[in-house]
Image (cartoon, rainbow, N blue to C red):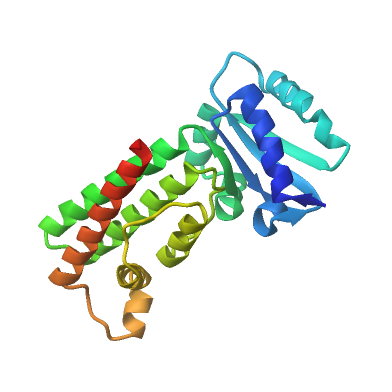
Amino acid sequence: MVSLNDAIDVSNLIVKNMQPVSIVIFGSVGRNDSGKDLDLLIITEDTSKTIREINLQVNKYLKPFYKRFGIDPFVIPLSVLREYHRKGSPFLRLILKEGRSLYMKDAVKEWFKQAKDELDMALYLFKGGYYKGTCYHSQQSIEKSIKASLLSKGWVLERIHNLERLISIAEDYGITLNILEEDAIFIDSIYRGRYPAEAGLLPLGEPSDTDSKRSLSIAENTYSSIKAFLQG
């Protein structure tokens, strides 16, 4: 059997020797943290090397692991990946659905940049009186800020949107977040009500001006505290 830790060991070796853009695990290990073999998508920078040459290079580094378990590496240059994505590749859709990121170049920087973008969108929508959008993008900013701080500590990215769970994981990594429990519960409740079906299920109504101000304030405070944490 192959474990998630085995996958991380394989990823670390590839990163050390090849400096890829990204490595994504999918298949049984991606879904369940264990499986019979390892499926990896390895995204490289565009290069003059052919796909065959890159595959030979990857397989050379994977040889020590082949005695222990099977590995199916799918290697693709960044420009080819983008072209397949534009064409709606079913293979890429599958990976987006069930895959997990083991490595992303400049991951902390990218996630924190997205957190700032979400915060800017929340502020823009608030000024326009779009309170539901303000609350949604505030939650997204908080979520991405926390994930940036966790990635800086070596956390393996997971599909988690619940802030209370992310805060709990952050505590395990020794990260102190300036978010009150009642604020986390409030933000999670706002996020859960973002779909029409959910809004129609319970007669809660749209977020108010007060709700959106509170969401924006929590997002701004979280972004500022994590910015200080990352810079420190």
Looking at the rendering, which quadrant does residue 132 occupy? bottom left
> Seen in the image, is 90 located left or right of residue 111?
right
Q: Position of residue 4 (x, y in %)?
A: 69, 50
Query: Which residue is depicted at the point 78% across and 40% down?
Result: 71
Q: Position of residue 15 (x, y in %)?
A: 62, 29
Between 117 and 13, which is closer to the camera in this rendering? 13
Query: Which residue is depicted at the point 31% across and 57% down?
Result: 178
Query: Which residue is depicted at the point 82% across and 29% down?
Result: 63
Q: Position of residue 48 (x, y in %)?
A: 59, 13
Q: Position of residue 55 (x, y in %)?
A: 72, 25
Looking at the rendering, which quadrant does residue 204 occupy? bottom left
> Seen in the image, is 90 located left or right of residue 200?
right
Q: How many numbered badges does the structure rendering display?
A: 0
Looking at the rendering, which quadrant does residue 232 occupy? top left
Between 61 and 86, which is closer to the camera in this rendering? 61
> Seen in the image, is 136 located left or right of residue 31?
left
